[in-house]
Image (spheres, grey):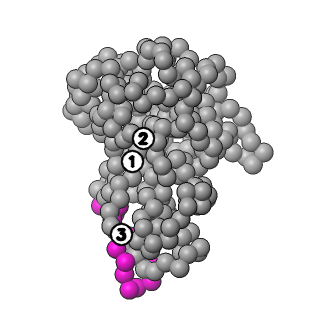
Amino acid sequence: MIGFSNAKINIGLFVMNKRPDGFHALESVFWPIAWADALELHRTDAPGLELKVTGLEIPGTNEDNLICKAYDLMASKYAIGGVKAHLHKTIPMGAGLGGGSSNATCMIRLLDRLFDLKIADKVALELTAELGSDCPFFWNATPALVTGRGEKMIPPPGFQASEWKNLHVTVIHPGVHVSTAEAFASCNPTPRILEWNQLSGGTIQNWEKWLQNDFENGVSTLHPEVKMAHNHLQNYGADYVQMTGTGSAVFGVFQNEEKAAQASQSALEKNWVSRACAMNACL
């Protein structure tokens, strides 16, 4: 059984306040993009999980991998048997693309199918929330306005898929890893001035007037490569450019498909990792 776990970008990312539980409340529109890892599962007679990883190297031990944590969580709640898993990793880590969270959610979905558990969506969202703040988004992986720690999701206000059908996104990972801790340590939040329905019905060129990622300035200071990637996309004519998540990947939204492809190809020639795709490719 094979599943594909997509990356996401954050269209705007605002740090609102610190919650009583010590976590920060965030607001952002999460958007799935056509950049995916592949995860294959098979039942085995031996108990437990055997995980093989190919593609990009993942730091740490398998036990640190969210896929293993997802299996352990499911095994603690359901009568599931042994599993052999193969993850082929293409989404860079420490990039703000949500690859690890997406892998974990994909693992829960595949275990549900493999063992015919018939988990309801509400239960699945609760399970994924136990694994990480971004994980619930990937259960349905449709555009969402995400608030709180990431567990509260609604469709973006005024969202119409038809408005995005001619848009393209180029993502660049400039080869640096940003930890969540250093991103928060260097973050200086500014007040949110937009209403989220401004994403619909207007021109993309206006986004830069009221959209931002509160982490970008601090991360760019620590890692100049992020600013270089940002400037690269602007130079190729992107209508809006922003770092995603806590970094270090940067994306540009284009109304011109050829420019989006050229920006990606040029980034690859700089030995950066890059992907270009239609904004509606996952809708």
Crowd rating for badge 3 (residues with CA inside 10 Å; few <14, some 14–19, many 20+):
many
**As drawn, is 268 to the left or to the right of 125?**
left
Residue 41's label in the rendered image is 3
On screen, residue 263 above or below 118? above
Which quadrant of the structure image shows residue 110? bottom left
SS assignment at label 3: strand
Q: Which amino acid does label 3 sit on?
A: Leu
Q: Where is residue 56 in the image (x, y as percent from the top left)?
A: 32, 54
Near-viewer residue (15 or 203): 203
Residue contact at pointers 3 and 1, CB within 8 angstroms: no
On screen, residue 101 above or below 80? above
- The segment highlighted magenta reads 39-54
On screen, residue 140 above or below 241? below
Of pointers 3 and 1, the one earlier in the residue sequence: 1
SS assignment at label 2: strand
Of pointers 3 and 2, the one earlier in the residue sequence: 2
Residue 65 visible: no
Residue sitting at 37 percent across and 81 percent down?
Answer: 44
Residue contact at pointers 1 and 2, CB within 8 angstroms: yes
Give me the C-alpha separation between circle 3 and circle 1. 17 Å
Near-viewer residue (281 or 14): 281
Of pointers 1 and 2, the one earlier in the residue sequence: 1
The residue under label 1 is 6
Verify whether residue 120 appears in magenta.
Answer: no
Give me the C-alpha separation between circle 1 and circle 2. 6 Å
Residue sitting at 49 percent across and 22 percent down?
Answer: 200
Q: What residue type is labelled 1?
A: Asn
Crowd rating for badge 1 (residues with CA inside 10 Å; few <14, some 14–19, many 20+):
many
The residue under label 2 is 32
Residue 199's label in the rendered image is none
Verify whether residue 43 appears in magenta.
Answer: yes
Near-viewer residue (162 or 179): 162
